[in-house]
Image: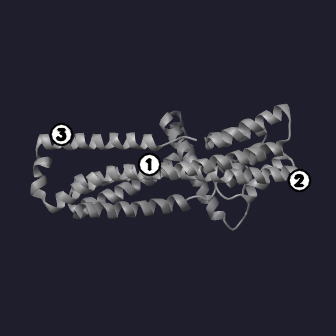
Amino acid sequence: MDKTLTILIFLLACGTFYALITAFMRKEPAQRQGLEALKGPSGSPEAFVEGASSRREALGRASRQWRRFDQYRSLEQTLERAGWNLTPVEFLIVAFIVAVVCAVGVAWWQHSVLWGGLSAVMVGIVAMVALEYARIRRMARFEAALPEALELMAASLRSGQGFQRALQVTAEDMPSPVKEEFGMAVQDITIGHTVEEALQSIWRRVPSYEMELITTAIGIQLQVGGNLSEILQKIADTLRERARIRGEIATLTAEGKLSAVMVFAIPILLFFWMKSANPTYMAPLLNTDIGRMMLLMAAISECVGMIIIWKMVSMEV
């Protein structure tokens, strides 16, 4: 029990340290460092930040050789979609440092290299799970804010402004992450990309059904013409209705999802409680080949049952 508590404490500490680093390491999106460099030195009081940025750019240039690997590009895309302003090399360096610190700390505390290695592996798993969770959460925030952004763009178009200006107003007035994504689209249009290309770039960064619908509708309107403000307003109404139906389905399936979690968690909690309360009773299950095989089959059955129940209560809208 003492070993488990120690690992949990170190994992909590490394998670907090990791979150702080990823939150405060850089203020600008990593993908826009090249565009910002075109402006040259500004002479602002934040000159020391530019020095740090130049070191980061040097690290980025040194790591470009890794871009030929699919895994590197996939991690880079995931970081971009999660809104973590880190390059893959920076992400891996931070994760490696935290893993080493936790491994050394746990190994020193428990006098066991095995527990230290296990904690390092757990840090890597926690880092990837946190990254995926951040990606899903950011996409959910983006999709939730899209109807309001479309209504703001439609209002700007009805007031006589052009599409690029409407896009810029939306980027200025909307919260994150719509602000960052639409701001990048405005930058793309400014440097010479077409409106359709800029919207497709947003869709590649945020691959949601809502953004695909918007990109397709605006692309068709630019080719054949029509009332763009009315189109955007209808899309906004459609997205709001879709969100309402999705919320109703989530409410109706909440009981089934909770049941799936409970069915998955109760045997695990019961196992650890019995192991702590009566180790002699659980010894044959842990110290014999048949017992370990039964534990393995039980774990597989738990995972399969969880997946089946989750699929039954999950519905796409």
Q: Residue at x 10, y 55 (%)?
A: 281
Question: Which residue is disc 2 drawn over?
Answer: 159
Q: As shown in the figure, which amino acid type bears the numbered disc 1?
A: Met
Tag 3–tag 1 contact (CB < 8 Å): no
Residue with the mark numbered 3:
293
Image position of 8 with respect to 309: above or below: below
Whether residue 127 is visible here, answered yes or no, is no
Residue found farthest to the right: 160
For this rendering, which residue is in front, 94 or 131? Answer: 131
Task: Answer yes or no: is residue 16 visible.
Answer: yes
Which quarter of the rendered picture does the N terminus lie within? bottom left
- N-term mark: 3 or 2: 2
Proximity of marks 3 and 2: CB atoms separated by less than 8 Å: no
Query: Tag 2: residue type?
Result: Ser
Q: Amino acid at mark 3?
A: Met
Task: Indicate the secondary structure of the residue bearing disc 3.
Answer: helix
Answer left or right for 152 relative to 27.
Answer: right
Q: Nearer the viewer, residue 188 or 215?
A: 215
Q: Quadrant of residue 205?
A: top right
> Along the horizontal axis of the image, is 282 left or right of 175?
left
